[in-house]
Every structure is written in C-alpha cells, then in structure tokens.
Image (tube, rainbow, N blue to C red):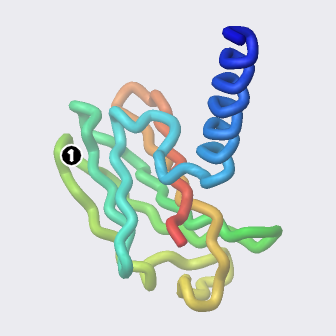
C-alpha cells in the first residue's frame, strides 16, 4: 500500500510540473538583478539596477518567426534610471514602427554594456 501511495504522489507531482512548464513563464531570464524590464500595454520599461552607468542599452521586440526584430537604443542610463519606451519608438531595419496589432511577438530582449565593457542581457516573454 505505501508503494502505491508513493507512485500516486510521484504521478501527481509530474503532472503539476508539466502543467507549470506548459503555461510558459512570465519571468525574465538573464541578468535580472542588473536590468529590470517591465511590459505595459503601451510601452516597455527598462530600469538600470546595476549600480553603475550602462551604455548602449539596446531593447528589441522579437517577433515570432523569421521577421526582423524591432529595436531602439538608449545611449546611456545612469544607476537607478528608468526609461519608458513607447511601442512606436521601436523600428525594424527598414524604419517601420512596431505595432503589437500587426505583429505576433515572442519576447523582449535587452542588452547593455557597463563602463568596464561587461555585457548584460535580459530576455522577457511577451504577455498575451
């Protein structure tokens, strides 16, 4: 009887783990302690929490499929500075502005360099 109970518990744990993985994450990955990224209805918010100035802060909206990324760059962000980047500020390589109505989005990628040249990267899935 105890063996059957253990097997049942194991099956339940596996089912819950698979369900959690299938739901996808809303959690950012990468250097989240250095760069904080937030998604709003009309903008993407990037906050420098690294303790140092960041340079070449590149924020990209990554579409689903082979389409080109929509991006924008902030030249410099001081420690604690928050940049609110409206969707129309993001453009693709041809200069076409981003609109969430016309593009299916996979996620947001933020890359930046600190004063020593160390590269930070954060990826955040797009909330549907």
Which residue bears the numbered disc 1?
78
Query: Which residue is painted at 72% across and 71% down in the image?
Result: 68
Q: Position of residue 72 (x, y in %)?
A: 47, 67
Q: Position of residue 57 (x, y in %)?
A: 41, 52
The answer to which quarter of the image holds residue 114 is top left
Question: Crowding near pointer 1: few (<14 within 10 Å), some, many (20+)?
Answer: some
Query: Which residue is painted at 45% across and 30% down in the image?
Result: 117
Q: Position of residue 53 (x, y in %)?
A: 26, 39
Q: Is residue 77 left or right of residue 16?
A: left
At mark 1, the secondary structure is loop
Q: Is residue 61 left or right of residue 69?
A: left
Query: Which residue is painted at 47% across and 36% down in the image?
Result: 120
Q: Is residue 79 left or right of residue 91?
A: left
Foreground: 41 or 2? 2
The residue positioned farthest toward the top in the image shown: 2
The residue positioned farthest toward the right in the image shown: 66
Q: In the rendered view, tell whether residue 115 sits above or below residue 91.
A: above
Q: Look at the image and tell me in which quarter the C terminus lies.
A: bottom right
Q: In this view, does 96 lie to the left or right of 87?
A: right
Foreground: 23 or 44? 23
Q: Look at the image and tell me in which quarter the N terminus lies.
A: top right
């Amino acid at each position: 009887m105890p063996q059957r109970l253990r097997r049942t518990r194991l099956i339940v744990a596996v089912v819950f783990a698979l369900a959690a993985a299938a739901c996808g994450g809303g959690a950012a990955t990468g250097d989240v302690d250095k760069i904080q990224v937030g998604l709003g209805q009309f903008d993407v918010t990037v906050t420098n929490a690294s303790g140092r100035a960041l340079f070449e802060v590149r924020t990209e909206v990554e579409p689903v499929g082979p389409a080109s990324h929509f991006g924008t760059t902030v030249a410099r962000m001081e420690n604690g500075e928050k940049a609110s980047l409206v969707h129309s500020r993001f453009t693709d390589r041809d200069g076409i502005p981003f609109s969430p109505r016309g593009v299916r989005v996979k996620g947001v990628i933020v890359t930046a360099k600190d004063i020593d040249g160390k590269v930070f990267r954060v990826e955040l899935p797009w909330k549907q």
